[in-house]
Image: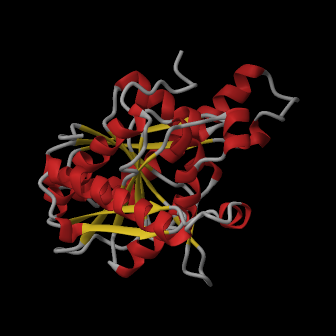
């Protein structure tokens, strides 16, 4: 994503504030991208009106879509400085409508607002958010209401010691996209890499095993690998954070300490049984974050919804 040409801004018909649209406009002004404001609506009651013919039900659905289209176009008049196309569709699965549009029209970025728990002040990710994270081939930017501050911080989460080539390639993609957004947002970039603690059972079962030596060796390996990865992208060692712990603990903690407005993270897009059995580290990280998130897929990723 060294450039953004087309942004799909997801409109939430239930929300008073369309911060996904606001963030899209900020990015479009700086990148020159075009914006399509997209809204998927559905009301099951219109499908259950069995006393009406299929043509009559279709006419009712079209009337609802037209009404929502007028509502959306009225909202867009608040932003005369940016040209924004609008589209309202009737679909019982919003995420499928979004992903089909991305695939068919080759959008570069999907931007969607997140909900916030009023009491806990934490981000709540909806089922649609998770489906997009797992299945959308384009980068998905999930945003809070707060605007990005000037001179802010963006955090790129990497796994510098992976032996999986797909993950290694994804590291470079994460950093390049994070650097591009840093240029747009006038922000500073930091890398974060978590490394595992010494397995307790090994220290118990093997008496001659020295956990402190092992731990120092692991730490050294992660530091050297992360710094080497950073050097390839002209990032100084001072902007590398390497800490012991699980990624879902370390990354949100570092993001909070650095007051990062955005975390860029790669997702492998597992679905179905493999996701249930293996789990997805990226999803655990995302669920623990309280800032904006840019979720990226590996190059060549094919969505399960692709026809």
Asked if one can make out residue 253 in the rendered structure from this viewpoint, the answer is: yes
Q: Nearer the viewer, residue 176 or 100?
A: 176
Q: Nearer the viewer, residue 268 or 229?
A: 229
Residue 114 percent location from the top left of the image: 50, 62
Asked if one can make out residue 86 in the rendered structure from this viewpoint, the answer is: no
Q: Residue at image x 34%, y 78%? A: 259
Quadrant housing the N terminus: top left
Q: Nearer the viewer, residue 97 or 167?
A: 167
Q: Residue at image x 52%, y 52%? A: 282
Residue 34 percent location from the top left of the image: 23, 40
Query: In the drawing, does residue 239 fall left or right of residue 121?
Result: left
Q: Nearer the viewer, residue 190 or 143?
A: 190
Location of residue 118 (image quadrant): bottom right
Query: In the drawing, does residue 285 fall left or right of residue 7?
Result: right
Query: In the drawing, does residue 48 fall left or right of residue 72?
Result: right
Q: Residue at image x 60%, y 63%? A: 209
Residue 101 percent location from the top left of the image: 44, 29
State how many labels appear.
0
Q: Residue at image x 18%, y 50%? A: 180
How did the renderer colour the structure? secondary structure
Quadrant housing the C terminus: top right
Measured along the vertical axis of the image, is residue 305 above or below residue 250?
above
Measured along the vertical axis of the image, is residue 296 above or below residue 261?
above
Furthest residue toward bottom: 119
Location of residue 138 (image quadrant): top left
Residue 66 percent location from the top left of the image: 51, 39
Furthest residue toward front: 208
Measured along the vertical axis of the image, is residue 291 above or below residue 67?
below
Measured along the vertical axis of the image, is residue 287 above or below residue 51?
below
Location of residue 277 (image quadrant): top right
């Amino acid at each position: 994503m060294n450039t953004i040409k087309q942004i799909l801004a997801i409109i939430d018909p239930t929300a008073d504030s369309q911060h996904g649209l606001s963030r899209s406009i900020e990015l479009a002004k700086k990148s020159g991208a075009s914006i399509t404001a997209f809204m998927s609506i559905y009301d099951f009651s219109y499908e259950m009106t069995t006393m009406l013919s299929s043509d009559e039900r279709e006419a009712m659905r079209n009337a609802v879509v037209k009404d929502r289209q007028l509502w959306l176009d009225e909202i867009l008049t608040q932003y005369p400085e940016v040209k924004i196309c609008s589209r309202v569709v009737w679909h019982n699965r919003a995420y499928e409508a979004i992903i089909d549009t991305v695939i068919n029209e080759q959008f570069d970025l999907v931007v969607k607002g997140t909900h916030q728990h009023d009491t806990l002040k934490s981000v709540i990710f909806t089922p649609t958010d998770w489906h997009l994270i797992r299945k959308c081939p384009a980068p998905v930017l999930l945003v809070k209401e707060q605007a990005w501050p000037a001179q802010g911080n963006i955090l790129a989460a990497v796994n510098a010691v992976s032996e999986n080539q797909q993950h290694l390639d994804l590291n470079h993609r994460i950093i390049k996209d994070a650097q591009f957004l840093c240029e747009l947002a006038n922000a500073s970039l930091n890398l974060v890499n978590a490394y595992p603690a010494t397995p307790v059972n090994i220290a118990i079962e093997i008496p001659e095993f020295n956990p402190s030596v092992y731990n120092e060796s692991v730490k050294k390996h992660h530091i050297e690998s992360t710094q080497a990865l950073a050097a390839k992208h002209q990032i100084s060692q001072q902007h590398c954070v390497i800490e012991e712990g699980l990624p879902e603990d370390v990354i949100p903690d570092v993001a909070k300490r650095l007051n990062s407005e955005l975390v860029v993270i790669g997702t492998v897009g597992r679905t179905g049984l493999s996701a249930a059995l293996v789990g997805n580290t990226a999803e655990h990280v995302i669920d623990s974050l309280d800032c904006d998130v840019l979720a990226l897929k590996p190059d060549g990723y094919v969505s399960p919804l692709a026809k």
